[in-house]
């Protein structure tokens, strides 16, 4: 492992691997340090939502992941009292993909390695210290303890994050449910619905297929709150499933069991100097809705291009701070939404359970409510703050519009990691700006359908700027201003920066993690 890298990522889960792929593809030297050795065959997260699939499509690996799982476009909740239809979602992915987390990690690791990222297993980070010029990591391996240095560090090391502790950041919140039982099992009598969820006043259960004959069973018993360290009794699990679902579906042959507790916590700041937090290191919440892994992957997509811009020397002032500004509210919203779902599921009194049935039925059957619920669950409704007076599309997810010529879709055009400027028609001024002045950062594309709107799409698939201006001169001036604001100065004004250069001279580190 080189003694100095542009970025060191701590943690090789889905968030860290997604970020490694983003940085390496952008020409940034990065190393991922993972405490575990040999990978993991355990399945924690298993739901990949539509917005995450769009981001993977924008990096060319969505189809590979789709081949590993089951597509679910309808969710049955609480014995069928509520059904959520995802088939009307916009885009290529009107469903949730159910696939083991290790498949997601495999695909993301393959992309990261192919792009040039280094993934080091059996390397445990025990301390992080930063100064004005870089970050030192104290790393323990089988060969001993060493100090590694980076320009930036990103903690993707989970709920017990060493990086977060080194920053002395609080992680406020509380446990919302304890002693949840998990098992990967075979079923003699699989449920008719692909996803099956049920709850009574004192029991909750959930069954989901992996697509290879194995199922994940999740169950909770209000009357049996054992510690996480206590082994799961398979008979207890089956009994709890029968109470919540009316059947255990002939569960047998558990290959893995575990208990866990679910917390709701969020760090107050995602950035401290040269150190960032992402995924479960920054926010953790109820598994209801399957949002955890998806939110972390989307954190990485947001941060990756911004770190690359900073290290390449063209980032506009304050760009790195927008990571916290944009992603912290998203994490907070996911925490609140998943918390509301789990509280509905665990409602104890008959009156509350009856109200739950009515509320969920309304939310999944009444048109306006249904049209809002599915995009919110899938991540397609996530939008970022826009400045006052901005175009109505600014900050919103960019739809995968058809383009004239090749590539034929916007998300294919995003695959090289640049901004994409989508113009209504061929415009010589636009072509000059994007092929001469900002060619290293912006790609020009022509919309395939009738439209008068020009949009600048960020590398993470969100609209940075849009305009309906029809005057060629005014439109060209507005585009130049937008490019300068989002993509930095034109190429001739960008200082030369070695993409794989070291973090610089190594001064004595300041104690603790808050320097820099």
Image (cartoon, rainbow, N blue to C red):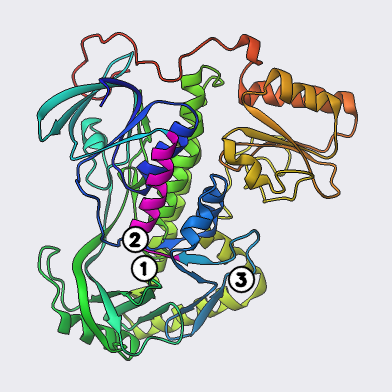
Q: Indicate whether 508 appears above or below 18.
A: above
Instruction: In the displayed orientation, state which residue is furthest to the front.
Output: 114
Q: Residues within 10 Å of mark 1 (few under 14, many from 20)?
A: some
Write down the residue under mark 1.
Answer: 342
Write down the residue under mark 3.
Answer: 87
- Report the magenta stretch's main SS: helix
Q: Residues within 10 Å of mark 2 (few under 14, many from 20)?
A: many
Residue 512, horizontal then vertical, whole percent:
20, 23
Residue 207 visible here: yes
Residue 387 visible here: no
Q: Indicate whether 482 appears above or below 77.
A: above
Q: Indicate whether 346 appears above or below 3.
A: below
Q: Quadrant of residue 472?
A: top right
Q: Secondary structure at mark 3?
A: loop
Q: Quadrant of residue 426?
A: top right
The range drawn in magenta is 98-115
Question: For this rendering, which residue is in front, 509 or 321?
Answer: 509
Residue 440, horizontal then vertical, whole percent:
62, 23
Q: Earlier in the sequence, mark 3 or mark 1?
A: 3
Residue 314, horizontal then vertical, whole percent:
55, 18
Residue that appears at 37% across and 35% down: 269
Q: Nearer the viewer, mark 3 or mark 2?
A: 3
Please report contact status of discs 1 and 2: CB closer than 8 Å, yes or no: yes
Residue that appears at 63% across and 46% down: 411
Write down the residue under mark 2.
Answer: 286
Q: Earlier in the sequence, mark 1 or mark 2?
A: 2
Mark-to-mark CA distance, 1 and 2: 7 Å
Q: Is residue 106 magenta?
A: yes
Q: Indicate whether 509 appears above or below 113.
A: above
Question: For this rendering, which residue is in front, 180 or 63?
Answer: 63
């Amino acid at each position: 492992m080189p003694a100095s890298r542009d970025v060191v990522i701590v943690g090789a889960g889905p968030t860290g691997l997604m970020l490694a792929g983003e940085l390496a593809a952008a020409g940034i030297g990065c190393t991922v340090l993972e405490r575990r050795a040999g990978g993991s065959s355990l399945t924690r997260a298993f739901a990949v939502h539509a917005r995450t699939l769009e981001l993977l499509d924008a990096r060319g690996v969505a189809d590979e992941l789709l081949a590993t799982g089951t597509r679910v476009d309808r969710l049955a909740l609480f014995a069928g009292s509520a059904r959520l239809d995802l088939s009307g979602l916009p885009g290529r992915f009107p469903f949730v993909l159910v696939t083991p987390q290790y498949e997601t990690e495999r695909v993301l690791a393959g992309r990261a390695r192919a792009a040039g990222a280094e993934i080091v297993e059996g390397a445990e980070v025990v301390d992080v210290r930063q100064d004005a010029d870089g970050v030192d990591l104290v790393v323990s391996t089988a060969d001993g303890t060493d100090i590694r240095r980076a320009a930036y560090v990103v903690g993707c090391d989970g709920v017990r994050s060493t990086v977060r502790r080194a920053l002395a950041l609080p992680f406020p919140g509380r446990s919302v449910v304890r002693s949840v039982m998990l098992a990967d099992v075979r079923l003699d009598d699989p449920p008719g619905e692909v996803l099956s969820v049920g709850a009574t006043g004192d029991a909750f259960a959930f069954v989901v297929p992996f697509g290879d004959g194995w199922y994940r069973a999740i169950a909770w018993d209000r009357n049996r709150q054992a510690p996480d360290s206590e082994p799961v009794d398979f008979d207890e699990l089956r009994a709890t499933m029968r109470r919540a679902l009316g059947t255990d579906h002939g569960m047998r042959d558990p290959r893995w069991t575990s208990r866990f507790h679910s917390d709701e916590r969020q760090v107050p700041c995602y950035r401290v100097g040269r150190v960032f937090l992402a995924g479960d290191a920054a926010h953790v919440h109820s598994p209801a809705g399957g949002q955890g892994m998806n939110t972390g992957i989307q954190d990485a997509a947001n941060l990756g291009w911004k770190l690359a811009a900073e290290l390449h020397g063209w980032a506009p002032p304050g760009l790195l701070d927008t990571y916290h500004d944009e992603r912290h509210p998203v994490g907070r919203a996911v925490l609140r939404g998943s918390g509301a779902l789990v509280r509905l599921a665990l409602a104890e009194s008959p009156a509350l359970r009856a109200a739950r049935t009515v509320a969920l039925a309304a939310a999944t059957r009444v048109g306006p409510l249904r049209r809002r619920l599915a995009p919110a669950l899938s991540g397609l409704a996530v939008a970022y703050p826009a400045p006052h007076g901005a175009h109505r599309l600014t900050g919103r997810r960019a739809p995968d519009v058809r383009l004239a010529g090749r590539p034929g879709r916007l998300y294919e055009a995003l695959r090289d990691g640049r901004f994409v400027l989508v113009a209504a028609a061929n415009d010589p001024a636009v072509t000059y700006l994007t092929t001469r002045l900002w060619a290293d950062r912006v790609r020009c594309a022509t919309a395939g359908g009738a439209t008068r709107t020009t949009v600048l799409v960020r590398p993470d698939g969100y609209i940075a700027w849009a305009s309906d201006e029809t005057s060629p001169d005014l439109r060209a001036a507005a585009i130049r201003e937008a490019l300068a604001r989002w993509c930095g100065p034109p190429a001739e004004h960008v200082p030369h920066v070695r993409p794989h250069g070291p973090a610089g001279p190594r001064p004595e580190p300041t104690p603790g993690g808050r320097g820099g």
